[in-house]
Image: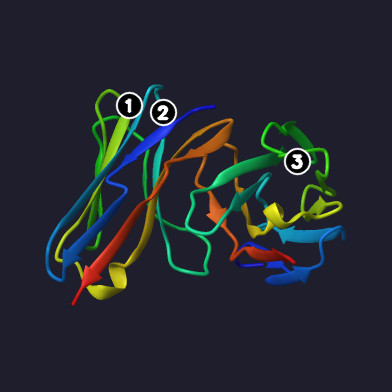
Amino acid sequence: GQQLNQSPQSMFIQEGEDVSMNCTSSSIFNTWLWYKQDPGEGPVLLIALYKAGELTSNGRLTAQFGITRKDSFLNISASIPSDVGIYFCAGPRNQFYFGTGTSLTVIP
Amino acid sequence: GAGVSQSPSNKVTEKGKDVELRCDPISGHTALYWYRQSLGQGLEFLIYFQGNSAPDKSGLPSDRFSAERTGGSVSTLTIQRTQQEDSAVYLCASSRVNAGELFFGEGSRLTVL
């Protein structure tokens, strides 16, 4: 099936640092989605991107839709402890394909 | 309802028993998805519905797994003769159209003893 490659797999950072993660695909997507999952809960949509080259912010989060439509990245600025969780990218084509996730740990 | 609702939130069952997991999508959402997530793992696609039909059942792990959706709303995922490897969180999600934004429920945690 469709593979979304997400990196890094895990990150351990100090509170206040910026974070960057990305997602690549061998196929084109017309929409890119970024989700965060807290332990014991379902994933929550953070940002949706609909146009190649689009750069969208949501508070301290910024995501970009790659110009080739085969990649996307998510940045988190000035990380805080509640940013801890697993971040997933996703792209829809008939069904929704998800990346393998990036586990973020923020050290106070 | 306001969000995707799943029940039960937790289910403990004995190996060999059948279980039913329920999903109530966001009102007006025509597409409904089931995913499975094992501990510390990513999301494994199981099946999706567009209305009451299931165009893609390719992710169902075996013939012990089945799902149905009635009235274009509630969906039930049934696992027959449960095995220990079925233990996981089963997540349901819905979207307005099958290429839009996807919204998840809290999941049903299944433990097979």
> Who's the residue at 78% across and 47% down the image?
B72
The amino acid pointed to by label 3 is Gly
> Where does the image place residue A35, in percent across and percent down from the top left?
41, 53
- Foreground of the two, A59 or A84: A84
N-terminal of the pair, mark 1 or mark 2, is 2
Answer whether residue B44 is visible to the viewer in this image: yes
Q: Tell me which chain the residue with mark 1 is part of.
A: A
SS type, badge 1: loop
- C-alpha distance separating marks 1 and 2: 6 Å
| Foreground residue among B42 and A44 | B42
Amino acid type, mark 2:
Phe
Callout 2 environment at 10 Å: few (<14), some (14 to 19), or many (20+)? many
Crowdedness near tag 1: few (<14), some (14–19) or many (≥20) residues, C-alpha within 10 Å: many
Q: Quadrant of residue A89?
A: top left
Q: Amino acid at mark 1?
A: Arg
Q: Could you say where residue B40 lies in the image, as x and y percent from the top left?
A: 47, 57
Read off the residue under disc 2.
Answer: A29
Residue beneath disc 3: B51
User: In the displayed structure, does residue A103 sit left or right of residue B15?
Assistant: left
Labelled pair 3, 1 in contact (Cβ < 8 Å) = no
Badge 3: how crowded within 10 Å, few (<14), some, or many (20+)?
A: some
Q: Are marks 1 and 2 in contact (CB under 8 Å)?
A: yes
- Numbered mark located on residue A69 in the image: 1
